């Protein structure tokens, strides 16, 4: 049951605010992405803001992708046990209207990055099924997430070039609970297990609503958390349509673990096709980054910029596996109707996955 309090980083467990508890790996996190509603260009921004109460750390990132280059601005500070201060160095989050409108401000002139964008939800956010996963006796993750598509107003400025993003749409989420953060635990569970994680997520924007699909699969390709939801434009709480028995297929690009194409099969006979147009690397936001991983202690305050030329990125490196592919999405209904939208096709595939033909930690598609 989502409430307005869930839009603030004050959770203590993977439950809504009314429940409390403690865990070393507890986190509370914001995420945003944005892109043009139509077309095939690669203009894309993304934001992350994480609070790690037990580590006394907060960190944030703002990324801008355009014309084959990805600019990553990252910041980290000591939390000082104040969870309501939603700023890390030059990056700030403001909750203007809980569960509906939020603002992101970036003021980093020394790094050549400035931005002010306001997100407004297209419909009431959805609460995804609780993500609980254990490795042997140890809890690997246990968290709740709300997800919401929306539209943006504002601008992004990089190296003096200002870009209007008022025609952008995209997705934001809020998640809280337990997952690995900060320094790696030096003692692995016994016996040792081969690392494995399979994740696909496809929030899509259409003129009349939003389609959300995700799946977490085990090494045999069996889903342990999967859901597909249609949220009509302007729908209120409990206004979504749930799809049962949804399946998918991925055509993997040779020599990678990234998709050339994806298909979501709906139970009514309809299907969605996702055609990637550009790939954004999630390590820009700290995901699996060897230095700027989430919750790492960078000192009292640290701010840093990194630039990537996307054509030069080695996609076989482990920390480059996690991407969001900006994609054209075509929905072919069982009645023969077709509608076209845009969205992201997030992929993170590590370790075996029988359905995809992956047998080891990092073998690539033939």
Image (tube, rainbow, N blue to C red):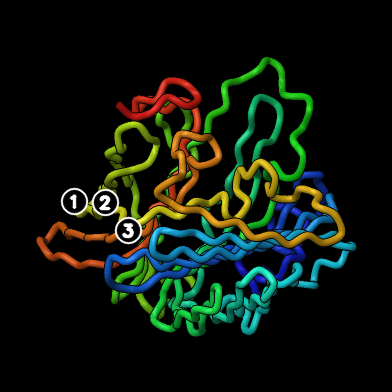
The mark nearer the N terminus, 3 or 2, is 2
**Percent position of residue 31, x then y:** 58, 63
The residue carrying pointer 2 sits among few (fewer than 14), some (14 to 19) or many (20 or more) residues within 10 Å by Cα, namely some
**Percent position of residue 236, x then y:** 46, 77
Q: Can residue 316 be seen in this view?
A: yes
**Percent position of residue 237, x then y:** 49, 73
Q: Are marks 1 and 3 in contact (CB under 8 Å)?
A: no
Give the SS element for disc 2.
Answer: loop
Going 69% across and 56% down the picture, which residue do you hit? Answer: 15
Going 83% across and 49% down the picture, which residue do you hit? Answer: 22
The residue identified by callout 3 is 327
User: Hey, which quadrant is residue 95 in on the image?
Assistant: bottom right
Is 53 situated above or below 236?
Answer: above
Farthest-out residue, left: 336
The residue identified by callout 2 is 266
Q: Can residue 214 be seen in this view?
A: no
Q: How far apart are marks 1 and 3 (CA)?
A: 22 Å
Is residue 24 left or right of 222 when viewed as pictured? right
Going 69% across and 41% down the picture, which residue do you hit? Answer: 180
The residue identified by callout 1 is 269
Give the SS element for disc 3.
Answer: strand
Give the SS element for disc 1.
Answer: loop
The mark nearer the N terminus, 1 or 3, is 1
Q: Tell which of 237 and 255 is nearer to you.
A: 255
Query: On the rendered image, what quadrant is the C terminus found in?
Result: top left
């Amino acid at each position: 049951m989502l409430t307005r309090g869930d839009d603030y980083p004050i959770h203590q467990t993977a439950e809504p605010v009314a429940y409390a508890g403690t865990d070393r790996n507890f986190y509370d996190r914001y995420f945003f992405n944005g892109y043009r509603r139509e077309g095939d260009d690669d203009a894309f921004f993304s934001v992350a803001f994480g609070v790690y109460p037990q580590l006394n750390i907060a960190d944030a990132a703002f990324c801008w992708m355009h014309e084959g280059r990805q600019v990553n601005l990252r910041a980290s500070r000591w939390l000082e046990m104040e969870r309501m201060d939603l700023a890390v160095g030059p990056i700030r989050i403001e909750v203007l209207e809980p569960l509906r409108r939020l603002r992101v401000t970036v003021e980093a002139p020394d790094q050549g990055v400035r931005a002010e964008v306001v997100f407004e939800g297209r419909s009431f956010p959805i609460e995804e099924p609780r993500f609980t996963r254990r490795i042997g006796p140890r809890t690997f993750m246990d968290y709740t997430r709300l997800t919401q598509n929306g539209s943006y107003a504002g601008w992004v400025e990089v190296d003096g070039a200002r870009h209007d993003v008022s025609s952008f749409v995209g997705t934001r989420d809020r998640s809280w609970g337990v997952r690995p953060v900060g320094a790696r635990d030096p003692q692995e569970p016994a016996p040792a297990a081969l690392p494995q994680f399979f994740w696909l997520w496809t929030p899509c924007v259409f003129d009349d609503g939003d389609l959300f699909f995700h799946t977490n699969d085990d090494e045999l390709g069996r889903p342990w958390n999967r859901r597909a939801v249609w949220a009509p434009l302007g729908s209120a709480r409990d206004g979504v349509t749930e799809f049962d028995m949804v399946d998918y297929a991925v055509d993997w690009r040779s020599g990678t673990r990234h998709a050339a194409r994806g298909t979501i099969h709906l139970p009514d006979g309809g299907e969605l096709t996702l055609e990637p147009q550009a790939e954004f690397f999630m390590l820009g936001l700290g995901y699996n980054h060897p230095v700027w991983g989430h919750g790492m202690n960078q000192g009292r305050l640290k701010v840093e910029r990194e630039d990537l030329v996307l054509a030069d990125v080695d996609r076989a490196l482990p920390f480059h596996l996690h991407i969001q592919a900006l994609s054209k999405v075509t929905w072919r209904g069982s009645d023969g109707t077709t509608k076209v939208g845009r969205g992201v096709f997030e992929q993170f595939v590590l370790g075996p996955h029988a359905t995809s033909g992956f047998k080891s930690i990092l073998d690539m598609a033939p």
